[in-house]
Amino acid sequence: MKVTLISFTPDPERVVAASARQCYSKFSATKALRELTDADIQRLLKKVIESGHLSVLEHASFTFAIEDISRACSHQLVRHRIASYSQQSQRYVKLEEIDFIVPERIDRDGDLKKEFSEALEICKRCYKRLLEKGVPAEDARYILPQATPTKIVVTMNARSLMNFFELRCCLSAQWEIRRLAEEMLSLVKQVAPHIFENAGPFCVTRKICPEKKYDCPKWVELYKK
């Protein structure tokens, strides 16, 4: 898996803070954008996030280039709204070499990995054979399994990302999309550390566990006292 933050709103925290200031002040956002100090920005961000005034977070957006995740993972990812997606097409892109995504639980078991790999190899050979016989890629792709890797560009605003992290950084989330969410969170923290300072699963952001799994290692780590 490779995740790259390829674009984001310039100075995202200042933009969000200026938007928030305009809501509570007679001054314009342009004036606030010029005059807010770093301390003002941190204070405003803390205030709006703690108060739940999260609509202002929608003014900051982040675009990720994601490579080598499975189709199983991308199918989970595109359920999240509001976001924009541009995924590699199996209709127009013929897959010359396919390095399937193998779950760790299968990879650790020699017998299961052998059986899993053999089944994937059959799918790969059939796919190539269909293409060689002139079957259009849009039809040949029907044989490809969910382990097939894909590439996708994703843009989300900060509010959508906060919700995405709450759901997908949870230890109950499926392992691949959880790893993806953790990578994305690590990247946005580098460019908007105060917005995403306390971002993460529900047990971190809201001190609740919607899954009610109070024996979860994360819950125990946070609240064992």
Image (spheres, helix red, strand yellow):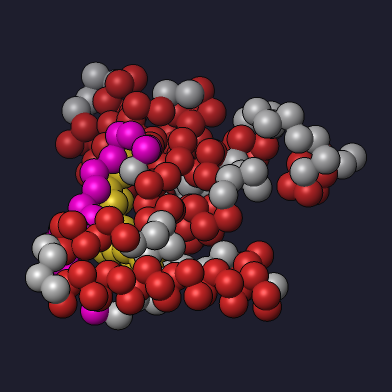
Q: Determine whether, in the image, residue 59 is placed left or right of residue 180.
A: left
Q: Residue at x 46, y 36 (%)?
A: 163
Quadrant of the image occupied by residue 7 = bottom left
Q: Nearer the viewer, residue 102 or 51?
A: 102
User: In this orientation, does residue 62 appear?
Assistant: yes
Horizontal and vertical percent position of residue 109: 69, 73
The correct choice, above or below, for 16 with respect to 21 in the image is below
Left or right of residue 224: residue 161: left
Residue at 50% x, 35% y: name it. 46
Q: Is residue 90 left or right of residue 108?
A: left
Task: Give the number of marks.
Answer: 0
Nearest the camera: 17 or 104? Answer: 104
Image quadrant where one finds the C terminus: top right
Q: Position of residue 92 (x, y in %)?
A: 12, 62
The location of residue 141, given as percent across then percent down, is 25, 60
Residue 17 point in image, percent of width and height: 34, 37
Residue at (40, 72) in percent of width and height: 122
Quadrant housing residue 203: top right
Nearer-the-camera pick, 187 or 169: 169
Q: Tell me, yes or no, whether the highlighted magenta stretch contains residue 92.
A: yes
Q: Main secondary structure of the magenta part?
A: loop
Magenta span includes 198: no
> Is residue 222 visible to us here?
no
Direction right: furthest residue: 225
Residue bounds of the magenta highlight? 79-96
Task: From the viewer's side, name the closer residue of 162 and 140.
Answer: 140
Assign the N terminus to one quadrant of the image: bottom left
